[in-house]
Amino acid sequence: MGCNMNDDEAKRIAKRPGIVLKFAGLLPDGRLTPDAHDDYEGLFEGLPSEWAMATTTVEPLTDTWPHDAWTFAYKHGEAEVLAVKHETGIEFLVMGVAAPLVADALVSLAKWTWSRWNTRRAQQPQKVQSSIFIEKTTVRETFPDGRIREQENVRWLLAPPVTDSDLTAIIQKAATQN
């Protein structure tokens, strides 16, 4: 089993994801903590066998410089997820989640990573405990050249502690939000 997402597809998803799921520390004033730079080494070692992974770089929508990233394929390419390294935390991006399998795949990867992410950060008491941010973007209308004319963004925030059932519920909600 391999990861079929090529670099061009990863770059396209980074510029216009359907769902963004981010793990990051949140300060009392609402800013994200830029303390995740050392949380990535070996993060995906021991990845469950239903996932294949490859590394790449992408330029996210919010930045103008390349970021390290990982592409993931679930089972036999039935669902693909892009994860992007940020100094504030890891971001998972999915192009669309209309199919229940894609939402289930994102839940599977997010729960596994959330557990590892929190365990690593808990060993460093100077770090802020992570929250989960999720944003669903629905493009309502585009111009003939593909630029977005109208879109709707819905955002959710889960403050710690976040359980697996909380994470599952919010991803399922985002997946079914129209």
Image (cartoon, helix red, strand yellow):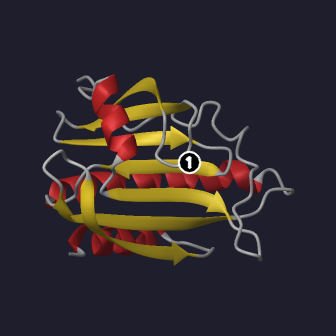
Residue 121 left/right relative to 114: right
Residue 74 left/right relative to 122: left
Q: Which residue is drawn at 71% across and 40% down?
A: 37
- Whether residue 51 is visible here, answered yes or no, is no
Q: Residue at x 38, y 44 (%)?
A: 15
Q: Which residue is drawn at 50% across and 40% down?
A: 84
**Amino acid beneath label 1:** Ile
86 or 121: which is nearer to us? 86
Which image quadrant is residue 126 in? Answer: bottom right
Q: Position of residue 139 (x, y in %)?
A: 23, 63
Q: Position of residue 11 (x, y in %)?
A: 37, 33
142 or 168: which is nearer to us? 142
Instruction: Identify the residue position indicated by label 1 in the image.
Output: 90
Residue 175 drawn above or below residue 58: below
Residue 150 drawn above or below residue 143: below
- Whether residue 16 is visible here, answered yes or no, is yes
